[in-house]
Amino acid sequence: MRKEDIAETLVKKFDLPKSRAREVVETVFEAITNALVKGEEVVVSGFGKFYVAQSKERQGINPKTGEKITIPAKKTPKFRAGKQLKEAVK
């Protein structure tokens, strides 16, 4: 499913103009993104939690040269499904 499909669902369910439905979907994803950028968690009750995980700096090996390298720390967006979503997918 794509963002366009989500917007189409809103059009059908709430009788919204397509442009308005797209705007709503974009706004929701923008709000989630902005919260994650600020380091906040986004909890959607019954659905799940979006959060940012911090990985530590670590040592690695360049596969081409065999040289030891330092892999820098980084932040990665993550999602943990809630209980209701897990049950629905079973």
Image (cartoon, rainbow, N blue to C red):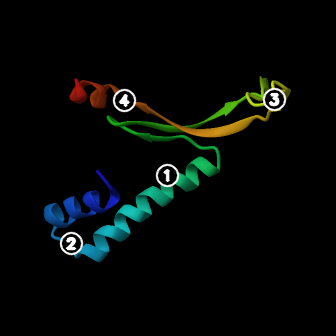
Give how far apart the Cα atoms at labels 3 and 4 are. 43 Å
Q: Which mark is residue 65?
A: 3
Q: Nearer the viewer, mark 3 or mark 4?
A: 3
Q: Residues within 10 Å of mark 2 (few under 14, many from 20)?
A: some
Measuring from the top left, give residue 67's x and y in whole percent. 85, 26
The residue beneath circle 1 is 32
Q: Amino acid at mark 4?
A: Gly
User: Circle 2 sits on which residue?
Assistant: 16
Mark 2 / mark 1, whichever is N-terminal: 2
**Residue drawn at the location 41% of the way across and 64% of the way down:** 26
Give the spatial CA distance, label 1 vs label 3: 40 Å
Q: Position of residue 41 (x, y in %)?
A: 54, 40
Towards the viewer: 30 or 56: 56
Vertical position of residue 36 compared to residue 56: above or below: below
Q: Which mark is residue 3?
A: none
Image height of 18 relative to 32, above or below: below
